[in-house]
Amino acid sequence: MEEPSELDRFLTHQQGRGELDSQGAFTLETRAALRKLARSSLPFAGAWAVKLVQAAVAAGASRLEFSHHRAETRVEFVAQLEVEPELAALEAAFFDPASEPGHLLMGLWSVGLGDGRAFALTIDGKTLLWDGRQLSRCIPRQAVKGVRLTVSHRAHDQQGFAPGLATRRKSEQTDSLRERAFTAPLQLVVDKQRLDGLAHCPSHGYTSTSHPLALTLSRADLPPLRLSRGSLEQTPPSGALPLELPAWPASGETGVAWLMTAHFGRNDHGMFQTVRQRCLLYWVQDGVVTTRDDLPQPVDCVSVALFVSAQGLATDISGFGLLENLDKADRVQAARTAVARDLGQLPLLNLEVMVRRARRAGWTALGLFLIGGATLAMLHPSLVFVAVSMGTVFKAGHGSHETRLESELRGAQERLVRSWPG
């Protein structure tokens, strides 16, 4: 059984002794206005966790860790913050519906006011405690370097046993991070598992039906997009090993990043068949996906996902919805033009040759992966990450099936190149 957490101790101390220095409370009218604002501002469950990622990225953190426990979620990162001004600003803005909230305050509003959950925010040894009714200052027992946020799973007025609450909270938060925060330019660790890197893209990263062929960084007249080296460092879920790669940009920035991915999986008979997927554009602001747009290319079994900075574009109140305007349209056009320049240079898939070589050598799927990766790397030096995880598909005894799948994928790549505007 877990020991009482710092948050539990703070709340017990406050309830039992009433000795904490209250820094503010609010009227019923203000409470209602703030609760309404908090509940309407963030559009999906677990959005507060995504806001914490944005806050950490904006503060220059290099690592952010979430850990889920029986009664609470803990979030930790190290950043250079001016402690007293930061806490004082949060105290003042927390009770002001007219304030312009940053990422951290929006996250705190969501859990504290929208969900009614207690939290303790500690920055370099000084703590703000929200118990569901008032905001207070307190001193932690142990020194904390950096930022630590502890959020209760329960609403402050929730009584009795709540079966499945911890599981639901963990699922909401982890799902939102998987969906939105794989683009974060830092080490994102959730329950000791790395989630950062474009290989974790839910539509074009490694899944049972998506097999990335190449990640390319294209020059473009666009705000810089910062990326995590997790895009290169981690072993793909397929088990394929990373190759020796060209140098990652010293700045970690690019104009537009894009994945080209083949989509196929096993049918009910155990044979592989293609799956159709749209081309997508992911908008990234302070390290997370705010929204994604469908691109007009035909839906096919080879498609691309573009990643473009949304910094400076107008958004709705949540920050997750981009407003349609000329600035956004110009960025879309610049990104598509940059991809068009490099897309036509990618080699057409020639899996048949790789299969023959692998058979002659008696190599396994891993050997096939290495052949394919090396081939693409030599033919297109601008690639910074190359993978042909589809090599796991081709086994002896399925020659006609291999040829048919290879033909479908290669045809889809040709159609993609033809359909892309120059």
Image: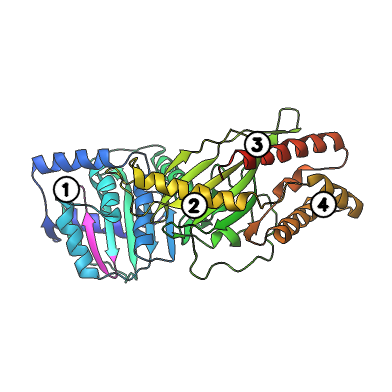
> In the image, what residue type sits under mark 4?
Thr
361 up-or-down from 31: above or below: below
- Determine which quarter of the picture holds residue 161: top left
Task: Tell which of 399 and 39 is nearer to you.
Answer: 399
Q: In the rendered structure, which disc, 3 or 1, sits on the residue that comes first in sequence?
A: 1
Question: Disc 1 designates what residue?
Answer: 133
Query: Mark 2 Cα within 10 Å, few/some/many (few <14, many 20+)?
Result: many
Question: Disc 3 designates what residue?
Answer: 301
Q: In the rendered structure, which disc, 2 or 1, sits on the residue that comes first in sequence?
A: 1
> In the image, what residue type sits under mark 3?
Cys
> In the image, what residue type sits under mark 2?
Phe
Outermost residue to the top? 268
Render colour scheme: rainbow
Report the magenta residues as a range: 123-132
Whether residue 138 sits left or right of residue 312 in the image: it is left
Numbered label attached to residue 364: 4
Dot 2: element: loop
Mark 1–mark 4 distance (CA, rounded to whole Å)? 62 Å
